[in-house]
Image (spheres, helix red, strand yellow):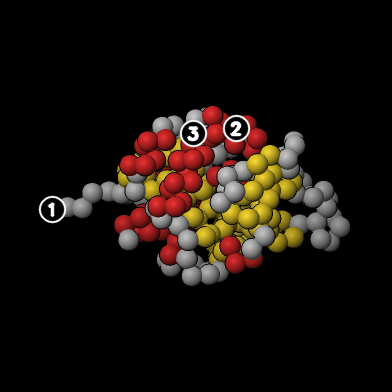
Amino acid sequence: MASRSPRVAVVDYGSGNLRSVAKALVRSGISAEVTGEPAALERADGVVLPGVGAFADSASSLRACGLDDALGRVFESGRPYLGLCLGLQLLFEESDEHATTAGLGLLPGRVERFPERGADGGRLRVPHIGWNTVRWSGDHPMLASLPEQDVYYFVHSFRAVPKEEAHVVGVADYGKPFAAAVARGNLFAVQFHPEKSQTSGKRILDAFATWLAA
């Protein structure tokens, strides 16, 4: 009997590009269900939290729907979690976007706006938009099939500042180095958009499919 495709819940909390993420997952052999129901997260083999928009609104929406607690249970269960863009930022304890807002608190650290100037004193254009190289390091299962570095598409004005350096598995440069990907156990999240990153993005989602199957 042929094995079934892993089933993933793409979390719908009213933020952005859900259908394009789901389609990209399907191209990597993953059965994707876009859902805002906490119970659907309990049934899934893994969870993807994408997002485009404001941290405070998104955190409020997750809590209003009971999705924050459901995501906490996914973490406790050990099932794979993949965060994309805002789905990375929401993992942290807080963000200073507009006003200080609590995140999911699954990783220690905070989210801050890019500074106006880089390490060399030059003015930074914010938001950071476009293709940028990410350098990978660490032994997380998601990294096993990835090259040492690759180029991905970013759109963001804020960056995560993890408290634990060990949680940073991907670094990019914009003004100075920043955390482009983080991981802790069954959590893996990237600041860029795999669904917009063509071949390099598909490699990320293929790696997620392999991790789910394992």
- Indicate left or right for 21 with 62 as reference: left
What residue would you read off at disc 2? 60
- Three-letter amino acid code of the residue under disc 3: Gly
Which of these two is toward me, 130 or 171?
Answer: 171
Numbered label attached to residue 66: 3
Question: The residue under label 1 is which amino acid type?
Answer: Met
The residue shown at (48%, 46%) is 72
Q: CA distance from mark 2 to mark 1?
A: 44 Å
Quick one: label 3, few (<14), some, or many (20+) residues within 10 Å? some
Placement of 118 over or under 137, stated as above or below: above
Toward which corner of the image does residue 97 lie, by quadrant? top right
Please provide percent x and percent y for residue 87.
55, 44
Q: Residue furthest right?
A: 121
The residue that label 1 is drawn on is: 1
Cα gap from disc 1 to disc 3, whole angstroms: 37 Å
Q: Can residue 153 be seen here?
A: no
Q: Amino acid at mark 2?
A: Ser
Q: Residue at x 57, y 58 (%)?
A: 182
